[in-house]
Amino acid sequence: MSTFNYHYIIIGAGAAGLNLALAMNEDAFFKDKKILILDKDKKTENDRTWSFWEKGNGKWDHIVSKTWKKSIVTAKGEDINFDLKKYTYKMLRSADFYQFAKTELDSSNIEWKTEDVQKVVQNQDKAIVTTPESDYTADFVFDSRIPSLYALDHPDSLNIAQHFKGWIIETEEEVFDDTQFTMMDYSIKDGETTSFTYVLPLSPTKALVEFTYFSPDLVSEATYDHYLKRYISEKLEQENYKILETEKGVIPMTNFPFEDFNQKHIIKIGTAGGWVKASSGYSFKNCEKKSKKIIKFLKSNPDYYRNSSPTKFKHYDKIFLEVLSKENHFGEELFYRMYKNNSIRTIFRFLDEKSLFSEDLKIILNLSSKPFIKAFLRHVKSGLKT
């Protein structure tokens, strides 16, 4: 088997891997570095939709497919409407992101190969990646594969998943206000679980309608379909519609120590690197932020990469996970209190890990409840271990 040598290898051409590759491509430091991207998929399909909020103009505006300045949360029978003010909520289709990345990364020092990675190991000097076709070596490998030790039932961590199925539907009549998206609608839910519908209107007759759980247990395909059909029939009052596209996913929301799997020459990225915000499941903007941190690390040449959120946010995430994993029925009340009693600016700053302690305290006091206090006490009893 042949062996090929690179400076950097990126395993996985998803949001994390391509954000990192694009960041390298934009920096003159990497122009003479040999970079390899490995993924078993050709990345030609729209396999997911990323959404995020940001102030003003952003890096991806030229490929964003839809934006909104208003939002609604429906919980406990109440509609909570938001003007996003300085923020804009943006939708990015993965197919557009993949195509943009392929065009930008068409460079003499960057290769993209469609191969399935079987093994990654390191020795004292480098990392070695094995595929059925070849062996590849690199000074650093950035690996987006989730460690095999992680599982939703891992006994030493708090684990729930954001799991969902969505349809892009087209209706015969105008149904949607495409100036406003639905962050969470709890009017139709699966029993006592934290489950809701998320709606991104693309036009008055077209929308992504997604049934989502924040729960420790996965469900069958038929269950997602049942609640999607119910929402479209009962809430949207539509019986005649076309399903244009389908997407589904499972995103870990956990305090599992992904960062412990970093090695000197092998660095975990994306979900596998703990880049998903544990209390919300959002990750795309984190990929952009964490990629910048890796670029800085590579240019400064320290011995070992460390990835971590500020300690206070790890504590907040742990308490959220305590509530949702132990008392999943309380999720609707928890998010009702968050969106009802706080400004969207405070919420977004909190979720972006940019909030001041005074803002954190306001959110914590507004969430104060028996399940929340019990979760806090369990956290204290654990020795404040995050």
Image: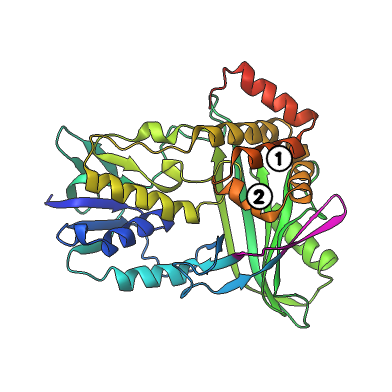
Is residue 118 visible in the rendered image? The answer is: yes
Which mark is first along the chain, 1 or 2? 2
Q: Position of residue 148 (x, y in %)?
A: 42, 36
Q: Which residues are magenta?
A: 71-88
What amino acid is at disc 2? Thr
Say above or below: 250 vs 266.
below
Q: Is residue 53 left or right of residue 1?
A: right
Q: Give the residue number, with chain letter if any, for mark 2.
A: 346
Q: Is residue 26 left or right of residue 7?
A: right
Residue found at x 28% / y 44%: 297
246 or 317, nearer to the observer: 317
Residue found at x 74% / y 35%: 365
Q: Is residue 290 left or right of residue 366?
A: left
Q: Residues within 10 Å of mark 1 (few under 14, many from 20)?
A: some
Q: Give the residue number, with chain letter if any, for mark 1.
A: 362
Q: Quadrant of residue 233?
A: bottom right
Q: Position of residue 276 (x, y in %)?
A: 51, 46
67 or 246, nearer to the observer: 67
Q: Which element type, helix, strand or loop, lies under badge 1?
A: helix
Residue found at x 13% / y 52%: 4
What amino acid is at disc 1? Lys
Please state the total of marks drawn on the protein image: 2
Q: Which element type, helix, strand or loop, lies under badge 2?
A: helix
Say above or below: 373 vs 193.
above
The answer to whether mark 2 and mark 1 are in CB contact below 8 A is yes
Say above or below: 244 vs 317.
below
Q: Position of residue 60 (x, y in %)?
A: 46, 68
Q: Is residue 252 left or right of residue 27?
A: right
